[in-house]
Image: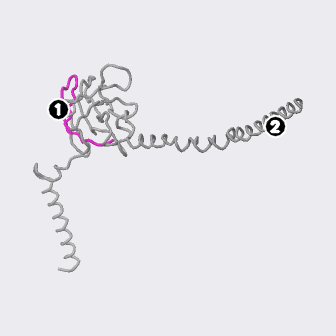
Amino acid sequence: MSSSLRRGALAAAAIAFSLASLAACGAGNNAQTLEVKPDNAATSVGDIKIQNALVITQPDATSTGPAVVSATVFNNGRTPQTLDSVKIGGDGVAQITPAKGGGKLTIPAGGHVILGGEGNASAALSNPGAAVKDGNAQPITFTFSKTGDVKLRAFVVPAESYFTKWGPTNIPAAPGATATGSATSSKSPKTSKSPKTSKSPKASTSPSDSVSGTPTDAASASATATGTATASTSAGH
């Protein structure tokens, strides 16, 4: 067999081995490729499909404030449905607010609704609790008017970087900023220079004037008294 034929046979064998490996990887329920999960939670039940579900907390771990659920909800049915409740963990119930108007949040037939972000509907949890920690995966239950409960597990992430615009709108001031502001505003002793500008001991010369003026007047009075006494003596003689 010529060298060119041998090289061709080896190349064909390598390709066949690669194809066999890929087939083995994709076979069975325990294949590694089936264990790969998406970064953001997604699931579908009946006509409802939920994608990119996340629980977004405050950007500062030391801050206290609401957390929100961010997700895109699709309704593939022919009739609209309302999102009646969103539960996080065991007993955390989020407050659902439509993007416009009041009442319940409606997912139109053949349409979708975005939860989180400016101008969109929101599902806010006022008191997330200690269980909702960054990096955890929290169970979330979406309850719809017709489909019922749709459950999944979503990651908990802080409102940083890309997630800033999807995070809670009510973000308290960071403790560091408050401390800095207080330190800056408390510099009145330095800006108020009353001890330096108020030079009352030097500017007020009244003690010196009183001392110098009083002896002079006394001397005049003494001279007057002496003159009077002399005149009286002369008159007596």
Compare residues 74 and 212 and report the one nearer the observer.
212
Tell me the element at label 2: helix
Scheme of colours in the image: one colour
In the image, residue 149 lies in the stretch drawn in magenta: yes
The quarter in which the N terminus is drawn is bottom left
Q: Name the residue under label 2.
A: 223
Residue 97 percent location from the top left of the image: 33, 25
Q: Mark 1 points at which residue?
A: 90
In the image, residue 88 lies in the stretch drawn in magenta: no
Residue 234 quadrant: top right
Q: Give the range drawn in magenta.
A: 138-158
Amino acid carrying label 1: it is: Gly
Which of marks 2 and 1 precedes in the sequence?
Answer: 1
**In the displayed structure, does residue 89 sit left or right of residue 126?**
left
**In the displayed structure, does residue 178 sit left or right of residue 156?**
right
**Vertical placement of residue 95 versus 56, above or below:** above
